[in-house]
Amino acid sequence: MQTSSDVLFISHGGGPMPLLGDPGHRGMVDRLVEMAGKLRRPSAILVISAHWEESVPTITSGANPSLIYDYSGFPPESYEIRYPCPGAPALAGQVQAALEKAGIPASLDDQRGFDHGLFVPLKLMYPDADIPCVQLSLVNTMDAGTHLTIGRALRALEYDNLLVIGSGFSFHNMRAFFAPNTPEIQARNQAFENWLEETCTDADMSETERTERLLHWDQAPHARFCHPREEHLLPLHVCYGLAGQAAQTRFEATILGKQSGMFYWRLSP
């Protein structure tokens, strides 16, 4: 990254529930508002969402993307949420160019809207919806190394005061969210959170070791219990690939009864 930027991995909660006053998301709402209050106001936001997968990295390039209500079974007001932020076609083109310069084929999509991995947290963090946004997909192989490489490629971006958000969830076992929160489940949840905190924030850990741990994240304590499928963790890999260093700050929130982590990197040229 040739210019200063902020990088965040966030746990974005369950569908639209954070915007509906759900008490199980109060801690998450508070953390996101706190984060936004501590950051410089970004000139644009690039979001890597857990809710978009393509065969190659794909970037929204429309000038005024619509919203995709990619959830079901929620109250009618869930489908009336608005977040009319502008797109950023020039930034989208830069992201594509950075990826292709690194040998990663990438596509632009000027028709796709923003899914709830973008509009739910940003409505909390930047409710005026006046900051241009671009969304970047995951790659549907779900390969950890691929997403680390995507993050590294983004270091070539020259866009001052860019905020990059990996929008996922540090714990994402849907069955466990709605099962009794037994001491065993709590212990599994906490063990993985402890591993993730050490991996992402230990400044004494070499970047070689940190990379190896993230490449083989599924060997962490109770990893596959916390992430039966890895799509909500992989935005973190993109964030770390971009940052290439220990996160300066970890934020914690209890979401739907589960311990969840969020990480912040401040990058300077």
Image (cartoon, rainbow, N blue to C red):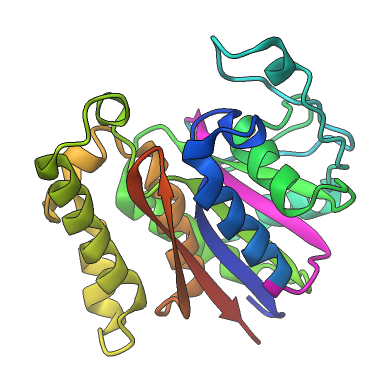
Q: Who is closer to the viewer here, 173 or 26?
A: 26
Residue found at x 68% / y 80%: 2
Q: Position of residue 187 (x, y in %)?
A: 14, 51
The image quadrant that residue 182 belongs to is: top left
Tell which of 154 and 36 is nearer to you. 36
Number of on-image labels: 0
Q: Residue at x 25, y 84 (%)?
A: 205
Q: Is residue 230 visible?
A: yes
Q: Is residue 103 visible?
A: no
Up/down of 14 relative to 164, above or below: above
Horizontal side of 27 relative to 69 (left or right) equals left
Let me know if residue 51 is in the magenta part: yes
Decide if residue 246 is on the left or right side of residue 95.
Answer: left
On screen, residue 38 versus residue 101, left or right, reads right
Residue sitting farthest toward the front: 23
* Dominant secondary structure, magenta: strand
Magenta span includes 57? no
Where the C terminus falls, by quadrant?
bottom right
Residue at the location (67% across, 58% down)?
A: 33
Residue 161, how many percent across, how many down?
Answer: 77, 72
Position of the N terminus, as image quadrant, is bottom right
- Looking at the image, which is closer to me, 25 or 104? 25
* Residue at x-position 81% and y-position 26%: 66
- Which region is colored magenta? 38-54
Please tell me whether residue 268 is drawn above or below residue 200 in the rendered image: below
Q: Is residue 216 left or right of residue 5?
A: left
Percent position (x, y) of residue 218?
A: 17, 49
Q: Quadrant of residue 139?
A: top left
